[in-house]
Amino acid sequence: MKDDHRSGCPINLSLEVFGDKWSLLIIRDMIFGGKRHFRELLRSQEGISSNILADRLKMLVDEGMLTKTDDPTHKQKAIYSLTEMTIALVPIMAHLGAWGRRYLAVSEELSIRAELMETGGPDLWDRFMDELRCEHLGLPLDGPPRVRATLQAAYEDVIARKTLEGVVA
Amino acid sequence: MKDDHRSGCPINLSLEVFGDKWSLLIIRDMIFGGKRHFRELLRSQEGISSNILADRLKMLVDEGMLTKTDDPTHKQKAIYSLTEMTIALVPIMAHLGAWGRRYLAVSEELSIRAELMETGGPDLWDRFMDELRCEHLGLPLDGPPRVRATLQAAYEDVIARKTLEGVVA
DNA sequence: GCAACTGCTTTTGAAATGAAAGCAGTTTTC
DNA sequence: GAAAACTGCTTTCATTTCAAAAGCAGTTGC
């Protein structure tokens, strides 16, 4: 067993798992963007390079943050799934988004989801987590999944409005 | 103005500020350990090296996460203070600690504070934040500060008990 | 007067990062 | 049924960041 941890502090150990510039963005794209494949994740807003993405995916699988399975519809495709550990990061994502929105120079279209997560509060987070458990762990969900679709629709509304404003101006 | 951000996403921008292996640990030591001086911060559990600490402190001051003032009692000492931005990370710290405690191999003595923060919930976090605002921003506080002292006492109790168990065994 | 302490800086080697190209196989398209 | 597009990566190489150790010009306490 490799016990080369800097300390047993829970915050430190958390940072050892996802305390870098890319891991949380990959998880963000899986949670909020519904991305499951390598090539999808490669098309992030921030432009991760393929070697870094490959490295992080391998590490996240090793750490139990993701699982990797074959895609039955395509022999070369791999499907990455969230685990309970990663789904449990939803509240942290919501807080991080809210904090960034309050204190940093965010763009409107990329922060609308954070705004909705913030106003939705823990109830919304719980529904979202159930939705993710259904999608990634195969757990039953009563009622249709709506949270990610709602966030995505809001995002597209902002884009559409901004495009329109651009045309008018 | 330097606008070399990877994207305007609030999560990404947050990570650009403190998404590395050390920044949050420095902030943790200031919040939970009450550390205000360079040499105190250098004695972290994880053993940060002095050049990295100097670099991160400079960056955190530049980003508005900390302020730096002269210590009136010692011409060579600098005092680092939290800002509202950083105090607002208390709930995120609490969530991170709770997550780490649940999913990672934390040590008992270093996770007792996280446990108390978790059971205390948002009410405790708010009181702690008020306490930090008093200490770092000079805002008035009604009643004596107790949260950090309580957390610290619990930590020392665990240490004392473990030492005793070691002696007995 | 001297030892200990102050917040750093410098040096040096190792490790991580990032852009670009490439690759062997699979699937789609026409 | 051949060509083009797509699959999840890997390789290469230049640049940046990190980390350990030592050092430094002052300041303070005894």
Image: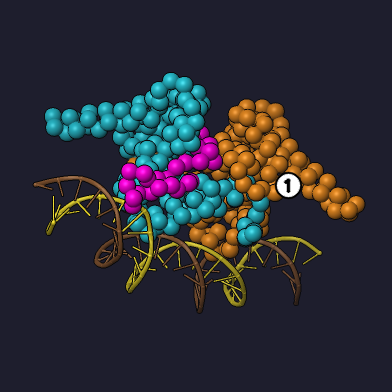
Chain colours: A cyan, B orange, C brown, D yellow
A88 is within the stretch colored magenta: yes
On the rendered structure, is A38 left or right of A20? left
Q: Nearer the viewer, residue B26 or A137?
A: A137
Furthest-right residue in view? B168
The structure residue drawn at horizontal position 44% and vertical position 42%, both measured from the top left corner, is A81
Residue B6 visible in this rendered orientation of the protein? no
On the rendered structure, is A149 left or right of B94? left
The structure residue drawn at horizontal position 66% and vertical position 27%, both measured from the top left corner, is B142
Residue A84 visible in this rendered orientation of the protein? yes
Q: Which residues are magenta?
A: A66-91
Q: Nearer the viewer, residue B56 or B92?
A: B92
Q: Nearer the viewer, residue D13 or A134?
A: A134
x and y percent of residue A86 in the render? 50, 41
So how many labels did they put on this image?
1
Q: Nearer the viewer, residue C17 or A152?
A: A152
The structure residue drawn at horizontal position 22% and vertical position 28%, both measured from the top left corner, is A161
* Chain letter for mark 1: B
Secondary structure, mark 1, is: helix
x and y percent of residue A50 in the render? 35, 57
Q: Can you say whether A125 is above or below A11 in the image? A: above
Q: What residue would you read off at disc 1? A: B109
x and y percent of residue A154 in the render? 32, 27
The structure residue drawn at horizontal position 66% and vertical position 51%, both measured from the top left corner, is A8
- The residue type indicated by label 1 comes to Glu
x and y percent of residue B20 in the render? 49, 53
On the rendered structure, is C12 left or right of D8? right
